[in-house]
Image: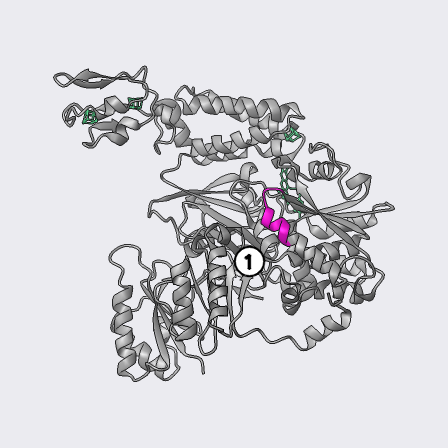
Amino acid sequence: MTTTVVLIRDTDSGGADRTRDVHDLFTQKVRDAGLQNEVQVVRAADLGIYNKGMVAKILPQGIVYAGIADADVDDIVTTTLAQKMPVSRLVYCGANEQVRIVMRNCGIVNPECIEDYIARKGYQGIKRALYDLTPEKAIEELKTSGLRGRGGAGYPTWLKWSLARNAFGDRKFVICNGDEGDPGAYMDRSVLEGDPHSVIEGMMIAAYCIGATKGFLYIRAEYPLAIKRVQKALDDAYGTGLLGKDILGTSFCLDLEVRLGAGAFVCGEETALIASVEGKRGTPRPRPPYPSDVGLFGKPTVINNVETFANVSYILLNGAKTFASIGTDKSKGTKVFALTGKIRNSGLVEIPMGTPLRVIIEDIGGGVASGKKILAVQTGGPSGGVIPEQHFDTPVSYEHLLELGSFMGSGGMIVMDEDDCLVDIAKFYLGFCVDESCGKCAPCRIGGFQMLKVLEKITDGKGMPEDLDTLKRIAQAMRKASLCALGQGAPNPIISTMKYFAEEYRQHIVDRKCRAGKCTRLMRFEILDTSCKRCKLCVVNCPVHCIAGDREKGYRIDQEKCIKCGRCFEVCKFEAVARS
Amino acid sequence: MEKITKDRLDEVLKNPPPENGRYIRVGMSSCGVAAGAAEVFALLRSEVEKRKLAVPVVPCGCSGGCHSEPLVEVCVDGLPSVTYGKVNAEIAMRIIEEHVRDKRLVQDYIVDAPMKRAVAL
Ligand SMILES: Cc1cc2nc3c(=O)[nH]c(=O)nc-3n(C[C@H](O)[C@H](O)[C@H](O)COP(=O)(O)O)c2cc1C
Ligand code: SF4
Ligand code: SF4
Ligand code: SF4
């Protein structure tokens, strides 16, 4: 017999935490009903439900009650715990259901144990492909599934494979793109570390479909644990005959190998990545020809993202229809996001396409940790954009995010609150692209640098209204003329913040103010003579000795010399230094 | 290593191996390890061995709840499986003594990890 467990948690953030009181009340009632040997009442740390009052979750049934008043406890004990009947008026059905396809085994299997994966129906997808489907049929299955690439642009996976299958070449290759370099993104790392066999199986299916006999997993060198687990998974796959020659008793042969990423963000771009695997410098080249025609060593090559491959093995196992039943019209299946920034529950979430941003941020992510107002969320990494709070009811899909001037990207989602300055954020992303630009083409190399100079001017308090037009003009040129998506996408964070947060730009340029206090050059420190106690603490702490005066006359900051470091503001014990 | 054949895979589909009913799983991906999962894992293993408890301690990947790592999921006879968050050496000891040995869940550290809410298809 399994003991029934009642998990208790006060989910309201304001006011006193009543978890303990209600736990004690519950325990007493359970004892009164004589159920203490069958029921345990336990205080939980987090039930993944927020601002829904007192919540109880009953295990193993999984019933959730929310908004419980003390008077309801009796009812729950007599009805649910004693008679095993639900108390319907209290039942909570959250909107925050995740769906796990890519992460179906993450947190469940031992990633270093191939038997665990087999027990979870692993390698059934490739078995089905080899025995029950021709390559054409398998590609057809992917077409029905509607799977699109998860590495950024959302190109239909079946089409990419079909092109590579039909391309002429005496050898063909598959590559898994595990270079994941977007700031704040780590979905691919998690899948490689948590369930490497699902990615390997996806690559096997791709190789079978296009007729490849050799493949590479390109993983960034900064991911040592992922590399180790993938290598172990490959060794085990070879050891059990799932890689190498005559796989599963058929004539299908495949060799897979790990290659370490060279460390540059641009190496995640497919043509640069291919050059890097070939041992050349990782710089992009013009497309067409696309890798599906002319790829690795000039041969037809399929290159897909880690998450894409993990979806492929699921689709072949469970069927295209099951997969296509999830998501929106044009965006099928799920997407994994790495939720970071000013969010209570930073971590990975996998949601069906079409889930509103608000559900991800508020219900699953639990909202902003500080209780401050959410301003926006950044998606799509350095080529993405910022989506303001008023658009949080938008469903997440390739199309909808594009409409908002952002981008699905690989799945970074950074939440920003009132303490963030949107101009500063835009400058951060652009700075990232300028640093990572390979310098091969002028629009990106020069345009990015020029835009950054203009932004620095604005955040330094020297901006002019016409600077905004300059930014737009350079952005146009970069979008049109850059060779790869790094340069084409680099202006996106600026353009989208200019669109949604025009007022912030205006404040920086006209009022010379930064609302969030992030642009230090725009700040002004002053000593309030009436509050100043003449303790001299600020004077001795100022690194540039620009605070002068004496006990009689008081102290003053020389604004010309002040470097806005904020030391005086921090050290003053009497709140006599004003920051504005 | 034993070869995995088509017959073997067919057999798994026909007669799925029973889910292992007893385990202590520790999230051992980068996020878990960074939060101290390796020490927690080693401690749980050595305590289980020392006390000859019939429950395997196994590593697993990240279930997504990175903010509450190290995560430890405990499934033993007679109790529903639950996950503890932000586990350190002290809580790990309490998990062994209170949860595994005395069959009483540890107060204040259970998190309903996203994994538990997910509809695994
Ligand atoms: C600068 C740059 C960086 C990129 N980085 C990655 C990356 O880290 N991982 C990835 O899968 N795709 C990345 N891409 C996209 C790849 O070029 C390519 O579109 C993708 O791997 C295709 O896989 P998919 O069809 O499965 O999405 C990057 C593109 C650019 C322009
Ligand atoms: S757009 Fe930038 S990163 Fe891409 S090829 Fe040109 S210079 Fe290099
Ligand atoms: S630290 Fe504050 S109180 Fe002391 S001298 Fe400076 S401003 Fe005045
Ligand atoms: S902000 Fe820094 S430099 Fe300016 S007065 Fe204060 S301590 Fe000196």
The quadrant holding residue B79 is: bottom left
The quarter of the rendering in which ligand 4 is drawn is top left
Is residue A405 something one can see in this rendering?
A: no
Is residue A506 something one can see in this rendering?
A: yes
Against A450, residue B4 (above or below) is below
Scheme of colours in the image: one colour
Q: State yes or no: residue A264 in magenta.
A: no
* Quarter of the N terminus of chain A within the rendering: bottom left
The disc labelled 1 sits on which kind of residue? Gly
Q: Please provide the residue range marked out in magenta.
A: A221-229
Q: Which chain does the residue under circle 1 lie in?
A: B
A100 to the left or right of A369: right
B92 to the left or right of A541: right
Against A243, residue A531 (above or below) is above
Label 1: element kind: loop
Q: Which residue is mark 1?
A: B61
The picture places residue A404, in percent across and down from the top left corner, at 52, 42
Which residue corresponds to the image point at 75% horizontal and 65% vertical from the top-left? A127
The picture places residue B101, in percent across and down from the top left corner, at 42, 74
